[in-house]
Each structure stands twice: as structure tokens, then as C-alpha cells.
Image (cartoon, rainbow, N blue to C red):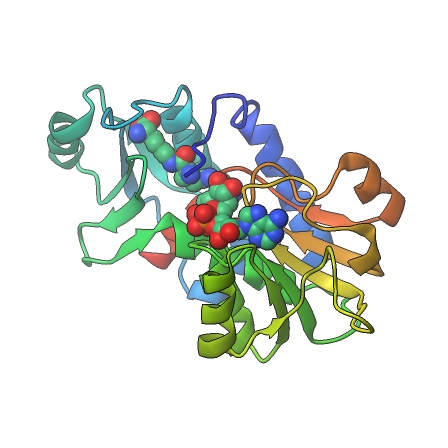
Amino acid sequence: MALLTPEDLENINKQLQEADSTVRRVTGLDIKGICKDFYGTTPCCEKVGIVPVTSGNGIIGSFSESLNAIAGYFGFDSFITDMPDVSGYYEAVKNGARIILMADDNTFLAHNLKNGKIANNQPCTGIIYAEIASRYLKADSKEVLAVGLGKVGFPGAAHLVQKGFKVYGYDADRTLLEKSVSSLGIIPFNPVSPEGDRQRKFSIIFEATPCADTIPESVISENCVISTPGIPCAISKELQKKCGVELVMEPLGIGTASMLYSVL
Ligand code: NAD
Ligand code: 2YG
Ligand code: MG
């Protein structure tokens, strides 16, 4: 899996503020408002203990610091433990953490020790980016294009199906595409080489791949939102500008907010 880099997390506060204004323009609500409305929860200064984890590829510079900034931005009272790993977990609990945030190379979790709820970053990220996309105020129909149907994309696409959207989808992995078709009823649609007369444009696009330039100009309608947690970005800056695309994309904060609100 592609891991975050310190470069992805540069100026995380600014990235979050910019994403927040885009989400407001796109949906009429800010990220907090979406999370509150969707999960029906509100933070009440819950203490969040962030535990750095050294296993696998080890600590990512500024990952814990970014989580600390993000938790604060959304109204949580957070701290980073001095020690990593098991000692850090012990330290977090001893210092009154009610929610633990920690990630190794495979799993990034939020665990509420008070009510037992636990969240995984991948589905939480997919669902919240899909939820944002589903609320696009200028959408011209209830049709969506979902590109990338993996650990983040599949739960997001499933959420859109559940909300009553007609979901056209594509994954470069045929097995994953077939799974989405058979279990979710997704309509296969390859944005890069659509078959025959199936050229379509979408005003709502949800993308969750680790590849750049997955969304070609041909599928972008006049008013279009691309809601994408995927890194690198699904669309070049030039194309975004040319097509006037509203781009919701941020490397860590929106998904983390979704995790935190989901365990309250
Ligand atoms: P994954 O490997 O489980 O899924 C990615 C899928 O994209 C794969 O199934 C792959 O076949 C497909 N794919 C690759 N290139 C494609 C293309 N050109 N067209 C269609 N499908 C293509 O990965 P994941 O865990 O679902 O993560 C997806 C992306 O989201 C990664 O870039 C990850 O770093 C990022 N991510 C971001 C956040 C965030 O908060 N922004 C959170 C979690 C993950
Ligand atoms: O504690 C640390 O600093 C590290 N053990 C964190 C490792 C996180 C690895 N995960 C990722 O890079 C992401 N794919 C998941 C984070 C979601 C936001 N994109
Ligand atoms: Mg995010």
C-alpha cells in the first residue's frame, strides 16, 4: 500500500482549511457539519491520545503531529504520547485518553475506550468522501462515477448505492470490479476507454486510487465535483481549472474526522 509522506502532510492546517471551504461551497455544510449530520454526534472535548507506531516502515515524520492538529481543529482535546508502541498506549490510557488514534502500515484506527466503538480509516474515508460527493448542490442527476473500488473505494461506492445513486464504476483490477458489480449492482464503466456509445459525463465523481490522471476530460460535465481521497490526485491542476471542477481532496484530515465522529 502507498504510505503517506511528510511532503503530503506539509501545511496540514492550510490544506484542511482549504478543503473545508471547498466542502462548504459544494455541500452548504463544512466538514464538521457533514460529520455531525451523518453520524449524529458532536465532540465534547474528548481526550484523544495519539500513539506513534514504529513497526514496519516506522514513524512517518509529522504523521502524529498532523493528527494532533486535525483532532484540535475538530474540537477534540488531543495529545501525542512521548513513548511509541505499547509503552505509548499505556501512557495514553494512564494520562486519561478516551479515544486512541494509532496506525501501522496496514491499519489506522480510532478506538473509543469508553463506549468500545472502533473505526478503521479506510471505510471511514471512503464513506465520508462519498457522502460529501452525494451532497453536491449543483448535481444534475443521481448518477455517480466511482473509480477505484479497493479498501477505500468499495465502502464509498457501497454508501452511494445505499443512498439511492445509480453508480457507474471502474477498477483496473477485474476481480474487484466484478465483486462490485455482483455485490453492489455497480454498472461497469471505464472512464478512459468507454465501450461504443457509452460515452457519458458525470457531475459527481468519487475517486479512490493511488494513481494520477484517472479521470479524463471526456467524463467531466459542466458542473462537476470530484471527491477524492486518492493520492496522487485524480486530475491535473490544468484540467481541473479548464473544466472548473470542484475538487475535494485532502491527505488525512477528512478521513480522520470521519473516524473520530464515528466512534463518539
Ligand atoms: P487499494 O489498493 O485497496 O485500492 C485502490 C484501487 O485502485 C485498487 O483496487 C486498484 O486496482 C485501483 N486502481 C489503480 N489504478 C486505477 C485506475 N487507473 N483506474 C481504476 N482503478 C485503479 O487502496 P486504498 O486503501 O483503497 O487507498 C486508495 C487511495 O486512497 C490510496 O492512494 C491511499 O493512499 C488513499 N487514502 C487516502 C486517505 C485520505 O484521507 N486522503 C485515506 C486512506 C487512503
Ligand atoms: O505512527 C506512525 O507515524 C506510523 N506508524 C504511521 C503509519 C501510517 C501508514 N498509513 C498510511 O500512510 C495511509 N495509507 C493511511 C493513512 C490515511 C490517510 N491517507
Ligand atoms: Mg482525508
Task: Say which quarter of the image contains residue 200.
Answer: bottom right
Closer-to-camera residue (249/219): 219
Q: Residue 118, can we see it?
A: yes
Residue at position x 48%, y 37% in the image:
73
Point 70% across, 42% down: residue: 213
Residue 76, position as x, y percentages in the image: 38, 41
Residue 105 position, x and y percent, is 32, 35
The N terminus is located in which quarter? top left
Image position, residue 187 (x, y; %): 61, 75
Q: Quick check: 153 above or below 242?
A: below
Q: Is residue 183 above or below residue 208?
A: below
Determine the residue positioned at 29% across, 47% down. 110
Q: Is residue 101 left or right of residue 85?
A: right
Can I make out residue 208 in this image?
no
Is 204 left, or right, of 156 in this rendering?
right
Q: Is residue 120 left or right of residue 112?
A: right
Residue nearest the viewer, comparing 228 with 65 = 228
* Location of ligand 2 given as a quarter of the image: top left
